[in-house]
Image: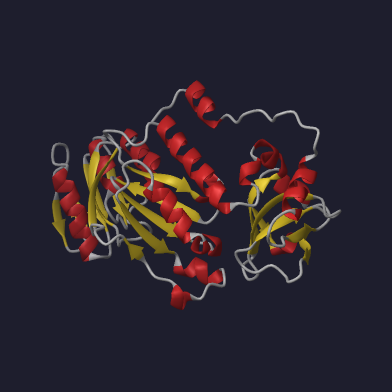
Amino acid sequence: MVVPSGRLIKCLSLPSLPPTTTTTANLLHDIASNHHKGIGKVVLKKGKTQLFKDGSPMVYSGAVDRIIGRPPPKTGDIVLVADGSEKPIGWGLYNSTSMYCVRLMQLEEEVVRDPSCALSMENLLEVRIHAATQLRRCLGLPSAHTNAYRLVNSEGDRLSGLVVDVFGDSAVIASSAAWVEKYKPQIKTCISSLDGINYLSWRPSIEFLKEEGMDLSNLEEVSSLTTPARVKVKENGISYLISLEGQKTGFYADQRENRQFIATISEGQRVLDMYCYSGGFAMNAARGGARNVTGIHSSLYWSSVTASDIKSNNDYISCKSGRGMVES
């Protein structure tokens, strides 16, 4: 999709900072001082501060000089992040096990712009998910031609560790950070309240959460009682039957533009799509006029799903299939 530059700039623009006589660091410090729970402080090593002021969203343990707090912060706790003089530069969510010691959520300048979100994950989740939704609306999502898309893209939407993919009226939430599991009820409430979302599926990323120090015995995939096992969706006008129990969230929604690009360079070409999964690249190549397209997957099940998808798009794709291979 081509978006006029002026339209995108309007979507991404942030309001200018209001005039203030209070320094941002003092404001954040004051809010923390009045918090009903003691807020720990992660102090950065000399020379590391600017990296995070410039937008790096995750504070690695190697950038930390010391941690202040009695008792010490626990995984999932809100903490201040401060420079070497202990002056706060922002706040985030702490992890005592992960290489990502803190996932930054708000910088000091943002606290001045919106104090209501300071040290409040509940408020911040509402604001960030609303902003993500509005940005997708500006990009024309969803539309008559595309109702499968990524609504929340982890660091890209300033919610590191949280991915939300929308497939028609179903939303699949992928969790890869301890804080996401901690705020699971709040996240589910935010997503389920969005217009057009009738079903939710929660997919914990076990390997990532293991590195986060999570107790894996307490993790489980959770879906609404009536969540369908398969959902039929469209992406760039091509129909897919998605299994919500498939790889990742069920569909590689972050590859939409790459799949569309393949269609623009495939005319007259012979195309091989290895490990084709749901056949997205293969079908876009065929739609783009490729003279021969072969999609290969190691799973007979996914080969049969891809063959079914191709047949459902038979206005421009013909299909023959065999064990582990789909060919148009």
Image quarter of residue 139: top left
Q: Which image quarter holds the N terminus?
A: top left
240 vs 139: above or below: below
The answer to which of 158 and 282 lies nearer the viewer is: 158
223 vs 49: above or below: below
Query: Which residue shows up at 41% across the image and 56% down it?
Result: 173
Query: Which residue shows up at 41% across the image and 46% down it?
Result: 254
Residue 159 in sight from this viewpoint: no
Residue 91 in the image: state x and y as whole percent: 68, 52
Residue 324 in the image: state x and y as whole percent: 22, 62
Numbered label tally? 0
Q: In this rendering, would 46 be left or right of 260? A: right
Outermost residue to the right: 85
Residue 247 in sight from this viewpoint: yes
Residue 69 in the image: state x and y as whole percent: 76, 66
Outermost residue to the bottom: 217
> Which colour scheme appears in the figure?
secondary structure
Q: In this rendering, would 20 be left or right of 232? A: right
Residue 174 in the image: state x and y as whole percent: 43, 58
Query: Which residue shows up at 27% across the image and 50% down it?
Result: 279
